[in-house]
Image (tube, grey):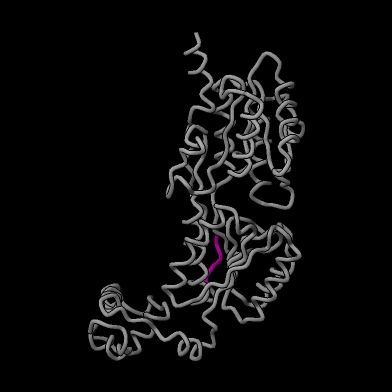
């Protein structure tokens, strides 16, 4: 057998030396009902024959549409694009077609899009939500629809969740900046109160500031930006500089988009890093894994790693497991993060060179 054109379940069963029922269990993800050796043997035969299950027949037998709804908060974001890339392969390999919609960070639009996906009888949802408060999605989950949250939490309900560790990297950044001798730290963010990722990172900043910079007010040192308004950002940076006379302040950006926006503002102001100001934040675009960032001089910015493609893949796999095992326990999967110290915050080394 060297083509999938005429390969049937019976052919797979015969080549693997198992029953058609066992092959069917394999195709439906019921691996607990077979030995690892049997699973490996079936997997090898399927791979060698390039067998593709008949999705229509599967959907008729299992009353499934073989479609998965994917709700993204901002489709143009490199972070979201990388997550979608990670989701694709596991879903397609399992015979599911992803239906991707963009809420554009609008909770009302997100609710309408989810209803549209539900009208298409999707078998489950992966949601990168635009709002921390989402009663509509809670209602859908209570009706038995498998839902996995990706990167952002929703309050008041226990969803399966896949994302990154947010608190400890911010805590480590504040400690690092203190050790380097920065006089003040500002947290620069987009609106964060309805976004769980931004909220958690900002809360971690406030707690770490109280520990390492006692007496500094985290409210005064939190700057909420409009990323379309560079002049407004420059005024915020000037305010941070004025709060640190005789010293050097540093900025922690809430995400990569904010980091790049701030980098443009710092250059426009003629400031030098780290002599005049420090800059750091998460690398949540995942570009280090796929592309060279050198045209944007991004390797010089201290950051901590977030892995959006891995988050997407794990979210897809989690949802597939929930579809196969509806009573599966919901849990959080949090990917670890690595702190990468670069020149933008190496203040001590910069002073030693000047001396």
Compared with 303, 211 (above or below) is above
Left or right: where 75 falls relative to 286: right
Q: Nearer the viewer, residue 238 or 31?
A: 238
Give the magenta range.
328-332
Q: Position of residue 130 (x, y in %)?
A: 69, 58
Q: Nearer the viewer, residue 224 or 175?
A: 224
Residue that appears at 62% across and 76% down: 145
Q: Quadrant of residue 219?
A: top right
Residue that appears at 49% across and 8% down: 355
Left or right: where 227 falls relative to 311: right
- Where is the N terminus found, in terms of image quarters? bottom left
Q: How many marks?
A: 0
Q: Nearer the viewer, residue 309 or 233?
A: 233
Q: Position of residue 343 (x, y in %)?
A: 49, 27
Compared with 23, 230 (above or below) is above
Magenta segment, prevailing SS (helix, strand or loop): loop
Q: Position of residue 280 (x, y in %)?
A: 57, 34
Compared with 3, 218 (above or below) is above
Residue that appears at 31% across and 83% down: 4
Queried whether the magenta region covers residue 312, the answer comes back as: no
Left or right: where 350 falls relative to 216: left
Residue that appears at 60% across and 39% down: 259
Queried whether the magenta region covers residue 330, the answer comes back as: yes
Left or right: where 105 falls relative to 54: right
Q: Position of residue 238 (x, y in %)?
A: 73, 26
Compared with 140, 218 (above or below) is above
């Amino acid at each position: 057998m060297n083509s999938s054109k005429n390969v049937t379940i019976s052919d797979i069963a015969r080549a693997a030396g198992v029953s058609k029922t066992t092959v069917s269990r394999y195709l439906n993800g019921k691996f607990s009902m077979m030995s690892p050796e049997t699973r490996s043997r079936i997997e090898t035969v399927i791979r060698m024959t390039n067998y593709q299950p008949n999705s229509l027949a599967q959907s008729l037998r299992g009353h499934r549409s073989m479609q998965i709804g994917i709700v993204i908060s901002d489709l143009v974001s490199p972070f979201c694009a990388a997550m979608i890339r990670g989701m694709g392969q596991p879903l397609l390999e399992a015979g599911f077609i992803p239906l991707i919609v963009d809420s554009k960070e609008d909770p009302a639009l997100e609710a309408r899009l989810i209803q549209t996906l539900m009208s298409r009888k999707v078998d489950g949802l992966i949601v990168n939500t635009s709002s921390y408060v989402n009663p509509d999605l809670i209602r859908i989950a209570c009706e038995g629809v498998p839902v996995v949250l990706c990167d952002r939490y929703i309050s008041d309900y226990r969803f399966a969740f896949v994302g990154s560790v947010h608190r400890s990297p911010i805590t480590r950044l504040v400690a690092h900046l203190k050790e380097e001798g920065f006089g003040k730290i500002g947290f620069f963010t987009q609106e964060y109160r309805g976004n769980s990722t931004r909220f958690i990172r900002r809360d971690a900043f406030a707690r770490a500031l109280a520990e390492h910079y006692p007496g500094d007010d985290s409210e005064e040192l939190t700057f909420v930006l409009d990323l379309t308004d560079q002049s407004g950002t420059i005024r915020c940076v000037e305010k941070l500089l004025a709060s640190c006379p005789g010293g050097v302040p540093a900025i922690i950006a809430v995400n990569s988009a904010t980091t790049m926006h701030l980098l443009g503002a710092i250059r426009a102001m003629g400031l030098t890093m780290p002599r005049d100001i420090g800059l750091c934040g998460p690398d949540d675009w995942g570009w280090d894994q796929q592309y060279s960032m050198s045209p944007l001089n991004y390797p010089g910015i201290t950051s901590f790693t977030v892995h959006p493609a891995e988050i997407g893949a794990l979210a897809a796999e989690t949802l597939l497991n929930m579809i196969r095992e509806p009573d599966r326990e919901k849990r959080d999967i949090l990917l670890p993060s690595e702190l990468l110290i670069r020149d933008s915050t190496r203040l001590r080394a910069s002073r030693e060179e000047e001396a």
